[in-house]
Each structure stands twice: as C-alpha cells, then as structure tokens.
Amino acid sequence: MNNQTGAQPLTPDQLKLTDRYWRAANYLSVGQIYLMQNPMLREPLKPDHVKPRLLGHWGTTPGLNFIYVHLNRVIKERNKDVLYVCGPGHGGPGMVANTYLEGTYTETYPDITEDVEGMQKLFRQFSFPGGIPSHVAPETPGSIHEGGELGYALVHAYGAAFDNPDLVVACVVGDGEAETGPLAAAWHSNKFLNAKRDGAVLPILHLNGYKIANPTLLARMSDEDLHSLFTGYGYEPFFVEGHEPEKMHQLMAATFDMAFDRIKTIKEQADLKSPERPRWPMIILRSPKGWTGPKVVDGKMVENHWRSHQVPVANCRADDAHRKILEDWMRSYKPEDLFDESGKLKPELRAIAPDGEKRMSAIPHSNGGLLRKELNTPDFRKYAVNVTEPGAVEEQTTKILGDYLRDVIRLNDEEKNFRVFGPDETASNRLGSVFEATDRVWMAETLGSDDHLAADGRVMEVLSEHLCQGWLEGYLLTGRHGFFSCYEAFIHIVDSMFNQHAKWLQVARELPWRKPVASLNYLLTSHVWRQDHNGFSHQDPGFVDLVANKSADIVRVYFPPDANTLLWVGEHCLKTWNRVNVIVAGKQPSPQWLTMDEAEKHCEAGLGKWDWAGSEDGMEPDLVMACAGDVPTMETLAATAMLREALPHLRIRVVNIVDLMALQSPQHHPHGIADSEFDALFTTDRPVIFAYHGYPYLIHRLVYKRANHPNFHVRGFIEKGTTTTPFDMAVMNELDRYHLAIEALHRLPLAADIAEPLITSLNEKLQKHHDYVREHGEDMPEVHDWKWPHSRVSKA
C-alpha cells in the first residue's frame, strides 16, 4: 500500500542536496557516538581517536535524520512553523546533529563552533562526563520531549498543537513506543483537535522493525491491517516504504507534499463551532533500522536488525577490524563533500535548511517560556467564604475553587492560553462551575442528551490520566497555562510521567536560554478520607511521597484546610513557574475555619499557630497538636476540644500546616523554616501529636533533623481501608479524635488517676462507634454533627 504516485517533486539538484544533507546529519550522528578526536577523518582512525566507552543509539537515528531533512524542505517551500517531537528520544545524536547543521547549536553554545575544533567538541561531549545526555534532553535546542521513557510523544504533540492554529507538530512515533499504553490511547487525541483554533499534528510512525532485541508488533502487521487500524482511529495513512535512498527521497518528498496539502485543505475548510472531525493525515515510514550503517559485523546481520539498535560496532579501540568497519562506515558519507576545509557545512547545503525562527531547532514553541504570557486571574478574595466563627459554616471547598477557575477561563478567553484537564472528574470533583464559562472539548458525535460538549470547549476530559497529563505537559512546555484535577488515588497512574516532567524542569532551570514555563498544577481531591464509599482501591494518599523525593527547587505540596486557604493556594500556584504544585483538598461539605484575612496570613507563612483553637494563653504549651490536611485538621480540633474540656488547665497549642515543605530545614528546601522558628513553634521538648493526611513516615522524613523530632508522634494513613463510613476510615487508621486524644494522654506527664479514666472513657467511645456504625450504617450523631465549641476569642 505504498503511495507510489509517480511524482518526482525533487529536481536532480534538490535530490543531490537532500541526500548530501542527510549524509551530513548521519556522519555527525555516528561521530558523536564514537569519536573524541580526528572528527573529519583527516588521518586513519587510531585507537585513541575512539571513545573508551561507546554510548548512544544508532538504529533509529538515520530515520530521524531522513524525516528532518524532508521537513526542512516543506518549511522552506511553504513557510510553515513546524515543531519536531522526537518520540525515539534515544536518537539524540540525530537531533543534536541537525541542530548543529542549522547553526542553532552554536548560537546556543558558542564554544561548540562550526569548524573542526567545534565538531570535535560536539563529538566528544556526547554521552561523556561533563558533556550532554544521550537523549533529546532539555539541553537540546528545539526539543520539548526527551523521549527517554517511551509513550508520551504523541500526547505531547497534541498538547503543543492546542490553541496554536498556525503550528504543525511533526511527531515521530517509534514502533517500539507504539506498543505502550499511553501512546495507544494518544491516537484518539484527534477527537479533541479543533482544526480552526488548534494547530495540526502530523504523526509519523517510524516502522524500522525492531526494539532492543525483539521485532515490533506494528512492523509485522501488513499494510492493509495498518491502513485499517489507523483509518479506524480517524487518520488518513500515507505509506513510505523502501531502502534505496534515491527512491525514498522522492517518495518521502511526494508524501510530505500530499500530507501538507491535506492539512492546508482541512484548515481552510474548518469551522470553529462544528463538531465534524476531519480525517487528518499521518505517515507510516518503513525503513531499515540502522539504515546506511554496517550491514554485517562479525558475520552477523546488523543493518535492518535489532543489533543496530545501540552501538553496531562495539570494540573499535581494541579490535582493528572493528575500527576499520567504523572508518569505512564514516567515510561512506564522504565528509569532504559535506564540510569545507574549516569543517563548516558547505553553503549550498546550509541553504536548503530554514533560517531564523523557522528552523525546527529554533522555533519559539520549543522554548515555551519565550511565548508565555502572565495568566489573567480575578481577585480570589471575592470568592471568600464568610467565616464568622471557626467551624460555624460548612462548604464544599473545591466548589469554591471551581467558581474561581470559571472566571480564570473567562478572563483568558481572548488569550486562549488556559485549559482545565481531568479524567472525567471535573463535575465529580465539584469544579462544575467552569461549565458556566465553557464546555468540554468534543470533536465526535453528539447526542441531544449530551451535556456541555462543544468543539470550542476549554475543558479537556478523557478517561485517561496519561492523556490529561501529557496534553497538559505539551501545553505548558509551549508557553501556556493549565490545571489538572484528579482523584487522589488514581493520580498514581501518572507517577512516572510526573517523574519525567520534574526531571525536565530541573535541568531546564539550569539552562539560562530555557525561559520559565508555567507550573504544572495538580488538585488531588476525592481523597483517601472521603473515599469511604468506593473502598480500599480508591484509598491511597501516596503521590505526595513520590513528589517529595524530587528536587526541592521544583516541588511544592499544599494541604489547605478550608476554602479560603484553598483559594489563596490556587491563585499562588497558577502564578508560579517551573514548578510542580500539588494541592490536596476535599470536595465534600466540611467546616470552614479561617476568615480570608486569616487565611492569607496563614498561607503566606506556610504554617502557624491557631491561637483561637489552643489554650496556652501566651505561655509555653504542655502539648502541641499539629495537623496537615482538611480531615486531620477537623479531627485534631475535635480532639483538642475534648482535651480542653477534660483538662482545663492543660496548655495546648494547635499548629496547622498548609505548605508541607515548610517543615524541612531551609538547607533542604527553600520553603523550609529556620530551626529557631521551628523550635519556637513546636518546642524543643514537648510532645507533638501530628495528624497527617498521608502516610505518617513522610512527616518523620521531613523533620528528622529537628531538635524535637523524638517527640513527634505522627498519625496518618496506615493502609487500613474498606467501604465504610467517613469517620470509621479515620478510626481504622487511628487518625480520629479519640485516638489522637488517647495518644496525647499517653505522652503527657499526667498522674495515672487522671489519665487512665480519660483513656478508658475514650476507648468506650471507640467501642460505641464500632457498634453504632455496624448497626446503623452511618456515623454517630455526636461525630456527624460535631461543631467547634468555642468562639474565636473565648479561651473557656
């Protein structure tokens, strides 16, 4: 099913120049993998010209270079803006080579000059200590996608295309990557692409047949089956197949012309409001793995085989025969025909590449901070809950945030640079107010009974956390803003994607030419303490443990205890850049504790005393009751109220933590508070009963070097769960008010005749709870209807 139209779009001169340029990229790619000296082969290769450790991946690289040179022609002839997303990121040598040929690499790194000396530095630095990584990492100009962990190229490409109507994102999908779950789901992203307001994505499925040591599934499918598969996905597949360079150049050029003509027609006929989905083109490229490399090494097939995946000739320092194969291979590209005497690309070859920002290595979208505009936000204070007394009113905390996000969407309607993402949970997570301002994006069949589906919506919902995360990453990395809400337990589905994005940001922050991009903001709700109805499978607060492992310059974790603190945190996170912000907040009706003025001061500090809740009266406390998270806060306050009533002379301090990273020392995290401040807040020798939303061990990790750490007694989720009542979830994990109060009584230096009757009474309460929920199927009224018993000024 080849697209053999007979077209010969390349003139004889163009054909020669295209092939020479491709050979130049291949030559530079091989040189990066192998050489540290003699870059132009002006003398026979010697052992010390070759790197002692050969690292890198050759197999995919010639195909990537082939695609690159043909995209350059399209860009030049059609004056298009094209972003190249390289799914097989292990083909890093090719992307670096093309960036160097275009001159962008030298502009970015002036010491890598366009001459023999610069070429030697280019070769030496690749996968070398003190040099650059082997993949298409942030250090590579033109890249928004490293491609180390496979599966995310296509979803990043679509994220980049959203709201970029003049952009074409050429996305190379490796046939190994095509076997991953996220990539398989990403083909459906075309159902969310509006041809009028968005750019185009041109997937190029690179079928070179093999992974590391196995054939690939798609490569062993017939053209007919592949055509059926991708037609079913909604694409128009074009096939390019072969191995003879001259024929392949003409075929690829003709196919790119057909694909870009089709994109042009789709864009011209697009209607912003129409849900009719066009059939976007895609290209299926069948070419040999390790194309143009050694065909046989040590009597074994290499080209068009998995043996070409990494380093086809492995022992070039010690083995003369291997070194001869390498030298013959590199000389086959005829470097003297490609570079002048100084080592610079010959001018007739440079002339076939685009100039300035039309170069794929210099397109501003690949350095999204260049395009980022400040997000317009309303005054969050106007959404404040009126809290006359602590706990006097209840609100659905995330619903209040939804009102705020609705107006963020409205205020950025003209800029078209903000979207909300979620896996079919926006309404469930009580953010439904956003549908007063926009709809869900939907480019598929609609029924009269459908709700808030529109071709021009700004809410991205699909039942795939991978797609939500990937779309958002692509959207942010190309200069826009977004917000991702998800059930807390199921954000684990994108643990590894978060890892990769955090690593990208960490490296990008250290590159002065990479401009800051908007932060990736998570709202984790439907959380562990209110998943009593769905059971154990939905109860897991561990994502923040993973987040806390990452660079302190990148990650922030917030536990706002009520709506007013959530509003402050939400606004703050949307205004930050180059970060990953995690907000954990419940969606069920819950007590509201702080006025907006109090919330602002509390959040700006990150943590602090709630004087109205304690009973220390300006004196040193006997006990510190600490809490982080909305349910732990309520349970801590309920325990405090019981202790104050039972022991009116006990001096209790209540400390609430919003910014979890404030618990660390400033040596370990920029938000950490000084030891003196920590000691003043938590004391140096008094018991601290800490009720924490997640796994308790994280708190110990964060405070283990603090003076009073031995007196920290942390309660949190200890992997006890089922389908039960909300309060029973807390009881099962010993985070409830009764267990917290018992823990305090055990840790206080109280006489036995005082402590033991109280502990007995609290244990009786726990037994009463146990019996009540099993008889009635709901929590006891004294729990369900509990209110904070004191006024803001009262200490009684």
Image (cartoon, grey):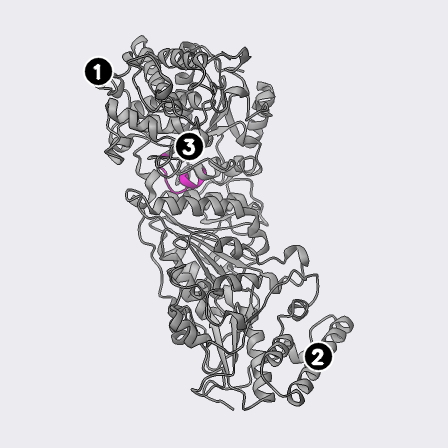
Judge whether residue 404 can be spotted in this image. yes
The image shows residue 322 at horizontal and vertical percentages of: 45, 14
Q: Which residues are magenta?
A: 158-167
Instruction: Indicate which disc residue 341 carries.
Output: 1
The image shows residue 461 at horizontal and vertical percentages of: 52, 48
Residue type beneath disc 1:
Glu
Label 3: element kind:
loop
Residue type beneath disc 2:
Asn
Residue type beneath disc 3:
Ser
Disc 1 from disc 3: Cα separation: 29 Å
Instruction: Indicate which disc residue 482 carries.
Output: none
Going from N to C along the chain, the mark reached first, 1 or 3, is: 3
Going from N to C along the chain, the mark reached first, 2 or 1, is: 1
* Residue 166 inside the magenta-drawn segment: yes
Instruction: Indicate which disc residue 134 carries.
Output: 3
Image position of 529 with respect to 207: above or below = below
Q: Quadrant of residue 252?
A: top left
Which residue does the image show at 52% across and 57% down from the upper left? 544
The image shows residue 653 at horizontal and vertical percentages of: 49, 80
Which residue does the image show at 64% across and 89% down from the upper left? 754
Image position of 182 with respect to 263: above or below = below
Label 2: element kind:
helix
